[in-house]
Every structure is written in C-alpha cells, then in structure tokens.
Image: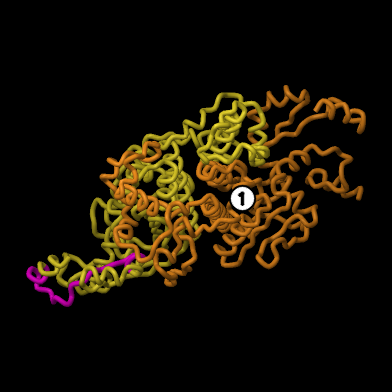
Chain colours: A orange, B yellow
C-alpha cells in the first residue's frame, strides 16, 4: 500500500492528500480503525446497499456482454445494455441474502431477505462433509444426486400427485430421507448388538432408544414394512448432501425473490453477490425457480461480475473527474453529456 | 383390528360390509395393498389435501378452545369458533410444507410450499447432533443459543444497520459463523501440527489446505486480525445448532407464508401439521415472522390438534348419518339443521 501511495503520487499527479481507500460492507465499519492504521491512508466508508446499486446500475447500463439469462440450450445468453432499467429487484446473495427494490438512481429500499444464504451452505457443508473451500463444496455438488437424501413426491406417493400439480420428481422435503434411514440403521445396529461396544460418544447410549419416537407424520410409514430396499445410511455421501443443500438454498432464494417481485410489481430480477460464482447448478436452480414460480412470465438475470457490485459502486462514488468516457452517476451525467 | 371388527358388529349394528379404514396421505396410496391385506378390511383412500381442509374447517367452526394465537404475554389466546372463515391460507408443515388457499368448502388450491420443512430439520439434526427423536431435538433447541452459530447483523456491523431497518440482533446468516470459525481452528491445528497424527478420515489430508480459499464475501474479514476472541469450534454444541436450525426453518416458513398470503389476498393464516407439536419456540418464531413481515397487520393462528387435521377430515368424509349433533360437511348441513 505504501508503494502504491508513492507510485500514485509519481504517476498521476493527484494531490497526495486525496489518496484514499473506498471501503464498503460491514467490515468497512467494524474494522475501520484497523484498516486506517494498517494502510496509513484515509478510508472512506460507504453504505453497502448504495454501493451495490451504483455498481449494478453501471454494469447493467454500460457494460456489454455483462448481463445474461440462463437456459439449458443457451447457458449464457447476453442481454444488450439498456437505459430504461427501473424499477427492478436486486437479490444480493452473500453470507445472507438481501432483496432490494430499486426505483431509480440511488432510490432503493430493502424489502426483504433471508438468513438462508451462502453462509448457511458453507457452514452446514463444512460440518457435514469436511469440505474446506466453497469451490470444493460446489465440485461435490456437481457430482451428487440429491434424490439419495431428499424425499421426492414420488417417494411419498409412488407417483405424481397430479391433482395439485406436483411431479414425482419434485422435492417434497430437503433431507427428508435422512432421518428415517438413519434411525432404521441405528435400530438395526441395536438389534444386532452393534452398539454394545460403541464408545465413540457420537451416539447417545442405547438406553435412550427406549423411546424410539419417530416424528408423527412419518411414523406410519416407518412402522410399515418397506416395500423396497432403501439405500443404507453409508450412502449419505458428501456429494449428495452438497447437491441437496445447494438445491434447497437456491430454490428457496428463488421462491422468495419471485414472491417479493410480485408483491412489489417488479418484472426484472437481478441476482448478484459472491454466492453464485458463475456456478452452473446454482444459476440453473435460481433460473428454474423464477421460471417455475412465475409460470414462465419472469426471468432471472445474472451478471458476469456478480461479486464486485459493491466494490465497483464504491469506486464509482469517488471516480476522478477525468475518468472514463461517460458518467454513470446521475449528478455527473448532464455535465459530461455536454462534453461527449 | 379383527377384534375391533367383531366388536363393531356387535355394538352398533352396522352392516359388516361397511366397516372400513379411512386412509389419507401418501402412504394411503403407496401402502394400499399392504394395509388392506394386513387389516382384512376395506381401505378407502381419500385425497390428502381435501381431508386436511375438511378437518380444519371442522376444527375452526365447531370446536371451542381449539384455535389460538400466540404472544409472550398470552401464549395461548383462544379464538371463538366462527362461521365466516373463507378465504384463508393453510400452511401445513410435515416433512415438507404445503400452502393451500381455501376459498370455500372443498374449494382449494395448493398455491405454494417449500421443501424446507420438518424433514429437513429432523434429517440435518440427526446428522449433526446425534439426536434420535424429534422431542429430543426440540428439547435441545430449548436450551440452545443460536448466536453461537448464526451470524447476526451486529456481528457484521458491530451495531444496528439502521439505514435499512436491521437490528443488531437480526439473524443475517443462519450458521454464518460456522464456516469461518471451523476453518480458523483447522488452520491453527495445522500450524501447530495438530493434524499430523490425524487419521480419523473426517478431515481431508493437510495437502488440500494449500488453497485455503474462503468465500470471497467473508474472506476480507477472515484475513483481518480479529478484534475480539471468538468462541472455539468446540462450542458448536447440539443445543445451539438445534436452536439455529429450528429458527431458520420456522422463520423461512413464516416469511413464505406471509408472502403467499399477500399475493392471494388472504388475511388469515392457519398453521397445521405435525411439525409444530405445540412447541413454544416454534409457535413463537412462526408468530413473530408473520407479525414482523406484515408489520403487525396479520396474525398466525394455531390449532391444539394440529397434527390430526387429515385424519379427522378423512373420518368426517365418511361419518355415519347418526353421528354427532351437527353436520360439519356442507351437503349434510341443511338436512341435519332441520333435525336440530
């Protein structure tokens, strides 16, 4: 940073006092003192949501081959940059999820969100699968089969539940197969004495199994003999678990985003944030959710630089007057238009 | 069952051929042949949703001290039975969640739902905590502190994010603290050689840590020195995990239910199904979610016999003509009213 400071002074002749770091997000406030001290330059803290929106507006209106929709046939269908962008819904997926209604330049409102976001996926998968990086988790999900852990409509009905429009492949309950299968294996282990030498501490002592009460709505199934052999719990592998949870989180965000867009009459939904990472399964699931819930009336839009909205927005808030061909901030707009 | 068959013939003089079992839910279809064979009586399969609604209508209109709302001050505030009940939203929470718009007697449509339901909670908690029964899971949740695993707004900002109306105690990311804390502990263990003798297989070999890539939106925090000591991963205990997941699932259902009620102009929202089980935390969270999202305009209604809607509905579909004081099914209504 100090080298950069010297370089900057040499190269572009800015006033040294003007060198600063634009910072946004929670860390900009929480770590303000530490950043200032460590870098030895001024730190300007900018509002996270405002920066997100400024960044997004810039990407949507100015950058070609940036905004795209997804379909199996055409996984990256680019949209032309456009100027009539308002109003729209921005769904920003980081550790948590914020949904922001944007009505005009710097005119926005957080209308909702969900705590089930990237942090939930990373946290649960790091506990369940031992994966250490998000990329590892996504690679696992890529190879997994969620039907091994999810209860599908077909698992419950043996067929579609056509009367209310549910296909047999629809996920009825995420992780819905796990509890019963795990309990069955444990009971079996108890019957064969498999637990008598268990001292790992990972399971409660066998005495607690005196009350093997299954949740009521599945107990009727569990107490009936099984019509077909189920896979054993050892088949709960990291890949299947990762796929199931990625689907669950993405589907859920997609549904809530759709419902919020309905409530606020927003026909365009952009997805941004570091959760997506250009990962095909994630983009596919979010796209599918919007298409499914809107009966094909709405589309999910993605950005190639989804993880950088806030950073670019913070930079743009302080862009040097002589930077770039066009102004992307409204107060610079008219002024610069005259020059062009 | 055979004894019951004989008893029934002796006692109420029904035509023996009329003795039957009313069955509903997925199992009624999937296990039809097995049930018939095992019980030796006729099995009448009834549509799950229809039975649910018939049961609920009966409970709402006929049974005193059945429907209640929740508040901290008055945890079980009973509503009077009422006759003008339509339209309403029924949120039925079993392994998965169905949301059903009910416009009149037997007039209903499944408008949505979520795969994040009871099955998800039971499945994930059985993997994460070793709990064997739903009651055990709820008891764990009762004692837990979700702030140990959830990332709160205050953890990110150090304070409220007032500008967009988020309190510091709001959950920003469910399980949002887990990933970072687990990674930090692992890195520490690697630094001190703690992993060199590890052969449990539960963690990948240390070589994979050559790329210790944290998800981008939290990496900036992770690479900064911590301002305050964080609890160690050993503090991820079953109680905290259970509480966090119970909150996450219940909050999420509450939000989606609210949004669906908005979309379909339904001011009354009933919660039913075996997930709730009269558990205070669950009822509290669902109530809070509806109040929070509707700005106090809507209330969540619960039922004392929430787990029996479908069973009672199936029974009512076939009630003997001479049963009860009043007809609760619309086609019996006028006929029986004359007798009363």
**Circle 1 residue:** A138
The structure residue drawn at horizontal position 34% and vertical position 61%, both measured from the top left corner, is B85
Give percent across and percent down for residue A79. 75, 61
Q: Chain of mark 1?
A: A
- Element under label 1? helix
Q: Is residue B137 above or below residue A76?
A: above
Q: Residue A93 or B3: which is nearer the viewer?
A: B3
Where on the picture, by quarter, is residue A41?
A: top right
Q: Nearer the viewer, residue B51 or B17?
A: B17
Which region is colored magenta? Answer: B8-28
Is residue B55 on the magenta stretch?
no
How many marks can you see?
1
> Does residue B160 show up?
no
The picture places residue A137, in percent across and down from the top left corner, at: 59, 48
The image position of residue B45, as x and y in percent, is 30, 71
Which residue is at 69% across, 36% downward?
A: A24
Residue nearer the viewer, B267 or B309: B309
Residue at (70% x, 42% y) in the render:
A310
Q: Residues within 10 Å of mark 1 (few under 14, many from 20)?
A: many
| Frontmost residue, A216 versus B173 | A216
| Extreme residue toward the left, this view | B10
Report the side of A115 relative to B128 (left or right). Answer: right
Residue A277 located left or right of residue B58: right
Q: Report whether residue A143 is seen.
A: yes
- State the image quarter where residue B173 is shown: top right
Residue A253 position within the rendered picture, expressed as x and y whole percent measured from the top left:
56, 52
């Amino acid at each position: 940073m100090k080298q950069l400071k010297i370089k900057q002074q040499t190269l572009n002749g800015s006033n040294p006092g003007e060198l600063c770091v634009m910072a946004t997000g929670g860390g900009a406030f929480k770590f303000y003192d530490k950043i200032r001290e460590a870098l030895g330059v001024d730190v300007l803290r900018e509002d996270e949501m405002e920066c997100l929106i400024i960044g997004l507006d810039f990407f949507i209106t100015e950058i070609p081959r940036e905004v795209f929709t997804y379909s199996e046939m055409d996984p990256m269908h680019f949209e032309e940059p456009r100027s009539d962008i308002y109003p729209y819904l921005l769904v920003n997926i980081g550790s948590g999820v914020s949904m922001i209604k944007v009505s005009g330049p710097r005119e926005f409102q957080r209308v909702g969100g969900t705590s089930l976001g990237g942090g939930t996926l990373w946290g649960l998968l790091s506990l369940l699968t031992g994966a250490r990086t998000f990329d590892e988790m996504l690679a696992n999900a890529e190879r997994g089969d969620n039907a091994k852990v999810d209860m599908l409509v077909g698992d419950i009905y043996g067929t579609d539940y056509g009367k209310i429009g549910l296909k047999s492949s629809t996920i009825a309950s995420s992780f819905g197969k796990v509890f019963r299968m795990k309990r069955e294996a444990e009971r079996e282990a108890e019957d064969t004495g498999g637990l008598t030498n268990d001292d790992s501490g990972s399971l409660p002592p066998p005495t607690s199994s005196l009350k093997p009460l299954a949740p009521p709505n599945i107990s009727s199934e569990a107490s009936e003999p099984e019509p077909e052999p189920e896979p054993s719990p050892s088949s709960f592998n990291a890949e299947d678990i990762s796929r199931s949870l990625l689907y669950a989180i993405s589907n859920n965000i997609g549904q809530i985003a759709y419902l919020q867009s309905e409530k606020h009459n927003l026909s365009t939904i952009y997805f941004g944030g570091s959760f997506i990472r250009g990962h095909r399964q994630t983009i596919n699931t979010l796209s599918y959710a919007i298409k499914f819930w809107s009966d094909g009336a709405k589309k999910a839009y993605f950005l190639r630089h989804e993880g950088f909205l806030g950073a670019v927005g913070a930079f743009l808030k302080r862009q040097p007057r002589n930077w770039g061909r066009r102004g992307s901030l409204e107060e610079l707009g008219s002024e610069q238009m005259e020059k062009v």
